[in-house]
Amino acid sequence: MGTESDENKTPREFAQTIHDEVQVARDTALKAHLLFIHSDHAAATAFMHHVDQLNHVLAGLNRMSEK
């Protein structure tokens, strides 16, 4: 949900905000993976899959911001 300050952001600033939020989500999924790695292999594997997907999203955002 946007805020008033979001209305004044440039496209590059929006892209950076999205990148930052995806990075937080990726880091959180990685922490969850590490929490489950010794107790629940299936959960750890699922979280690592999410980490991989979010890494792909981050790479795509990086490519977009280079243009």
Image (spheres, grey):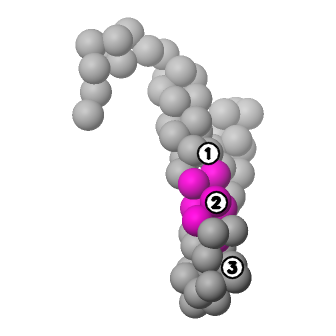
Tell me if label 2 and label 3 are in contact, CB under 8 Å.
no
Image quadrant in which you'd find residue 42: bottom right
Look at the picture and state if 34 lies above or below 59: below
Mark count: 3
In this figure, which residue is indicated by the disc labeled 2?
31
Task: Point out which mark residue 40 bears.
Answer: none
User: Looking at the rendering, in which quadrant would you find the C terminus?
Assistant: top right
Question: Gap between marks 2 and 1, in whole Å?
Answer: 12 Å
In this figure, which residue is indicated by the disc labeled 3?
37
Residue 43 in view in this figure = yes
In this figure, which residue is indicated by the disc labeled 1?
23
Dot 2 or dot 3, earlier in sequence: 2
Residue 43 in the image: state x and y as whole percent. Answer: 55, 82
Mark 3: few, some, or many residues within 10 Å (few <14, many ≥20)?
A: some
Q: Is residue 65 left or right of residue 46?
A: right
Question: Gap between marks 1 and 3, in whole Å?
Answer: 21 Å
Dot 1 or dot 3, earlier in sequence: 1
Q: Which residues are magenta?
A: 26-33
The residue that appears at 52% across and 40% down in the rendered structure is 21
Q: Amino acid at mark 1?
A: Gln
Question: Gap between marks 2 and 3, in whole Å?
Answer: 10 Å
